[in-house]
Image (cartoon, grey):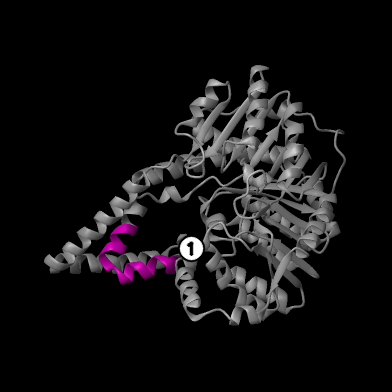
Amino acid sequence: MSTLMIFQIALLIILTIKLSTSLVYLYFTFGLLSLIVVFFVASQRSNPAHKLAWVIPILIFPVFGGILYVLLRSNGKNKKFRDKLDASLNKALPLLKQRTHIMDELYEQDKSVANQSGYILKASGFPVYNNSESVYFSSGEEFFVAFVEELKKAEKFIFIETFIIREGLMWNTILSILEDKAAQGVDVRVMYDDAGCMTTLPYKYYNELREKGIKCYVFNPFTPLLEIRMNNRDHRKIIVIDGHTAFTGGINLADEYINVYERYGHWKDSAIMIRGEAAWNMTVIFLQLWSFLSNEPEDYDSLKACVVCDGLYESDGYIQPFGDSPLDNEPVGEYTYINMISRARDYVYIFTPYLVLDHELITTLKLAAKSGVDVRIVTPHIPDKWYVFLVTQSYYEVLIEAGVRIFEYSPGFLHSKAFVCDDVLGVVGSINLDYRSLYFHFECGVWLYKTKSIKAIKNDFIETFEKCKEITLEDCLSIKPLKRIARGFLRLFAPLM
């Protein structure tokens, strides 16, 4: 399929070259069209860096770039896809109700914190809870043990949404339990992203799961056509068990995430488990995409009615799971991160596998560091994508000059997505600090305030710093000129990667 897509692009390039050499007037017409496209791109409400990444190829290759953009943006299937999915997402939002007294409590404790939670509620529709508990896992191995234990307890339903499934010890162990539970009458549903699993699962693998009694759908099946919707992947990692227990984080269902199989040195990841009513948010996030794929109405009320949480779980601070959609023109994940960084008083520590930042995030990080906040970012030392790693490193110098401390995880690849701030705030989820996560992917996270898991998250950072190499300004200045040029060139197109 990728070969066919490459063929389409090559054919488009050949045709535009032919037009430019044999049909001068037509070429002029297309050049004018490209200029109009540039004005159109500039007028859009998208991120300025994303606009620039399109404008450059359009101006350098006026015919090819302009036609490519028009083809991608004008596809009728894209609009139908977006409208249908948007309707599915909005249908579930009235089922989420914020208890007023909880927000009142937050405002009494800290108005700045309450404003952060209030933003997530207003932008995504997902409420905050004070009757649930959280457990943080600092590795895929810890997560896997707890995940298997909770799966075995399932009595009503198991919902799994993931970006990647790879056959091996981890998935085969999970699959065996899912098959047994389905045979016992448990409602087992699995949803995975087609592009994410293109090289890790057999073709039409969902049929194998259905034969085992497991309901399964593939999100946004990949087609070898030039369509903008192919950018919108389901990057979420969600597991919900019986409606009262939920997991999320950076961990996909593949052996490298639990270090059974080594790909890029030691794989460092993290996850969080939520028990209590807050798990309902994660249930709704899952069902929003599930109902879109199944084309069947979902009985949210009956699912919620079967969940009993009152009095079963210890109140553990404030927990707010939330979803982020690329269709609503609101980068909830990015703004949640910016809120936390800009309001930090003492420190903010960040795990991210990719550091591909827009102007807003760069400014926020620099301003926090210059204001005296201890800002530290941990990235991998051994990358999974060399070109993204070059872009990641291209941001080091400007951040370090402002006082941000950058660490690379020496043992291998760091895939965790976690924030911790001032011993009271944290976020754990699937959201990377890159354009794809912040603008193009379906993502999720859990906002935390005064939970016991905050201390565990901070301890994970402290222990991880000891295993890292801190990058200095001298390291940045010693980079060879050719590598600097390569970083700068790739950085121009980072929003399209």
Residue 23 visible here: no
Q: Nearer the viewer, residue 271 or 278?
A: 271
Q: Secondary structure at mark 1?
A: helix
Q: Is residue 3 above or below residue 424?
A: above
Q: Main secondary structure of the magenta part?
A: helix
Q: Which residue is mark 1?
A: 495
Residue at horizontal 72 percent and vertical 75 percent from the top: 369
Rendered location of residue 385, percent (x, y): 53, 58
Stretch of the chain drawn in magenta: 51-69
Place residue 21 in its image quadrant.
bottom left
Q: Is residue 115 left or right of residue 484?
A: right
Q: Is residue 299 above or below residue 275?
A: above
Residue 78 visible here: yes
Residue at horizontal 49 percent and vertical 69 percent from the top: 491
Can you say which quadrant of the picture contains the N terminus? top left
Place residue 454 in its image quadrant.
bottom right
Residue at horizontal 56 percent and vertical 42 percent from the top: 164
* Residue at the limit of the structure toward the left, as seen here: 22
Residue 65 falls inside the magenta stretch: yes
Rendered location of residue 94, percent (x, y): 63, 39
Q: Is residue 239 above or below residue 363?
A: above
Instruction: Determine crowd level at label 1: few under 14, some 14-19, many 20+ residues with C-alpha closer than 10 A.
Output: many
Residue 39 falls inside the magenta stretch: no
Rendered location of residue 165, percent (x, y): 57, 39
The amino acid on which the numbered mark 1 sits, given as a three-letter code, is Pro
Rendered location of residue 280, percent (x, y): 71, 37
